[in-house]
Image (cartoon, rainbow, N blue to C red):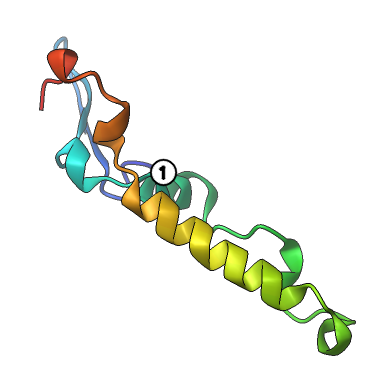
Amino acid sequence: SLKRAGLINAYRGSAGGYRLAKKAEKISVMDIITALEGDLRIVGCLDGVCAVEKKCPSKNIYKKLQKELKQSFSKIKLSDFIDKKYAMC
């Protein structure tokens, strides 16, 4: 999933393994979540039609919360989790 999303590259052979496809500063937590889980949905009813959608008092709150979560996760970078003295890229 991470390779398909362009976040890592796979290398074969005795020195093979996985490496980041771009700098950690360019990869957001939202990129990783989307690659592994798909689109972020805090509640299932935001995906489609709900039987009580027209009179649901919570849907707009959930939409706002979901938008804010996505924005926050987009601001957090993989590099924020890496101890700079151990970073290789």
- Disc 1 crowd rating (10 Å Cα; few below 14, some 14-19, many 20+) is few
Question: Left or right: where does residue 48 sit relative to residue 28?
Answer: right
**Residue at position x 73%, y 63% from top?**
44
Q: Residue furthest left?
A: 89
Q: Quadrant of the C terminus?
A: top left
**Residue at position x 66%, y 57% from top?**
42
Question: Left or right: where does residue 48 sit relative to residue 76?
Answer: right
Work out whether residue 63 or residue 21 is closer to the camera in this orientation and state it.
63
Placement of 1 over or under 15, stated as above or below: below
**Residue at position x 41%, y 43% from top?**
1
Question: What percent of the width, then of the height, locates residue 87?
Answer: 15, 20
Amino acid, disc 1: Ser
Question: What percent of the width, then of the height, locates residue 3?
Answer: 31, 42
Question: Left or right: where does residue 74 sit relative to residue 53?
Answer: left
**Residue at position x 39%, y 44% from top?**
29
Q: How many marks?
A: 1
Query: Is residue 21 something that shows in the picture?
Result: no
Placement of 1 over or under 12, stated as above or below: below
Which quadrant of the figure has residue 66? bottom right
Q: For mark 1, what is the residue?
A: 1
Question: What percent of the width, then of the height, locates residue 86?
Answer: 17, 13
Question: What percent of the width, then of the height, locates residue 24?
Answer: 21, 37
Work out whether residue 75 or residue 53 is closer to the camera in this orientation and state it.
75
The residue tagged with tag 1: helix, strand or loop? loop
